[in-house]
Amino acid sequence: MKFLAEYIKKLLKTWIFYLGIIPTFYDFANTYIKLDFEFSNKFLLIWANFWIIYASYEIWEKEKEEKNKLLEELEKLKYSMPKYEVKLILKKYEFEGVKEFENKKSKLLIKAKKQLELLENVEKLDELKGYEIEEIFDFLPIKSEYDLEKYQKDLKNFINILENLHVDESIKNTNFYNAIIQISNIGAKSDENIYCKIELGKENLAFDDIEEFRDELEKIQSKYIPLIPEFPKPVKIKNTNNLDKFLDVLNNKNHLLLQPVLQTLITHKSKMIYNLQPPYFFIDEHNLKVTKLNLNVGLIHTTRKFYLILNNENSITYFITSKNLKEPQKGKVKVKYET
């Protein structure tokens, strides 16, 4: 309402000024020369409408000129200030989980199918030499010592389970990187006491410590990559003593009895700040911060390396404030991939 009232005030003032031109001229001329004519009401109505339109246009023109002047001043101010560009430089971190799973699965399938083929065809088994049997079997498949029929059933079951184990496709859309942040002053003025916050978004995770990063990779692996069951073991026909059973438990690192013990070895590693002098660099999973940074024109600040799990590069943004910026600078972080 305030702006409307101001506009109406300016319009009436301009309109009344132009509207008074004819009466003023008429009175002035009538003083020295007797005029025998009068303006018709129709003419006066047209005259009044014309000048109200012209007055409105004149107000618009003046406002436009003032706006352009302000924009020019802002443009000059913009080019006399610091300006920042933030880049995320990424180099692929080789995650071997999927590859290791596929290789192990393939080797075990070949081994199990080969053993099953030989056990089902005794003639071929008898043709093998001693060292060839040792390469295929982890034991000597002697019928009098081992229950080979049960072992064949276990092999068939193992092959069936293994062939139905697959990596979750979701992990193939997740990327792992060694990363650094580059902050460049591409403006026309040096700056100091710069604070830069990079928001990665909920889909992405950053880690300062390699051990924490590897712990997260193990969690991802356990979520998306299935565990491969243990290769079948033959059952001896003769009874084994209790000592043998106990030794088997100790030798089996994946045995359930050992899981509580293994869990107690998992400890939380506290995050550390390695920068002992400004600028400081902080990492908090979904956010990165650089503080107390000074940058002259044309200079680039590069952070130390950190580790990144990237699912969505479009969600990464930055926010910068400093001594010489008139207002905070916000934008999208440019992502650059290196081989």
Image (cartoon, rainbow, N blue to C red):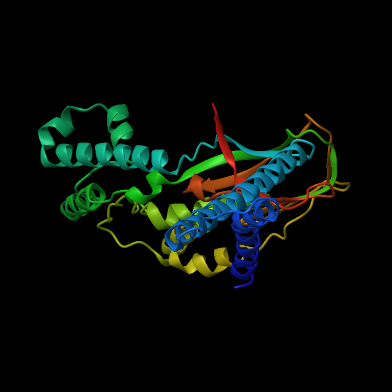
Q: Nearer the viewer, residue 169 or 330?
A: 330
Image coords of residue 300 (percent x, y): 75, 33
Residue 318: percent from left, percent from top: 64, 49
> Residue at 44% across / 66% down in the picture?
256
Is residue 47 shown left or right of residue 193?
left
Where residue 2 sits in the image (x, y, percent)?
64, 71
**Residue drawn at the location 28% of the way across and 59% of the way down:** 238
Determine whether 133 is above or below 262 in the image.
above
The residue sitting at 20% across, 40% down in the picture is 113
* Residue 118 position (above or below residue 45): above
Placement of 264 over or under 278, stated as above or below: below
* Quarter-of-image position of residue 108: top left
The front one of 70 and 154 is 70
Left or right of 280 in this view: 99: left
Residue 166 position, x and y percent, is 29, 49
For the question of whether residue 296 can be seen, the reply is yes
In the image, farthest residue toward the bottom? 1
Quarter of the rendering occupied by the C terminus: top right
Left or right, 262 with respect to 255, comes to right
Q: Is residue 274 visible?
A: no
| Between 52 and 90, the one nearer to me in the picture | 52
- Residue located at (40% from left, 38% from top): 99
Residue 22 versus residue 308 in the image, above or below = below
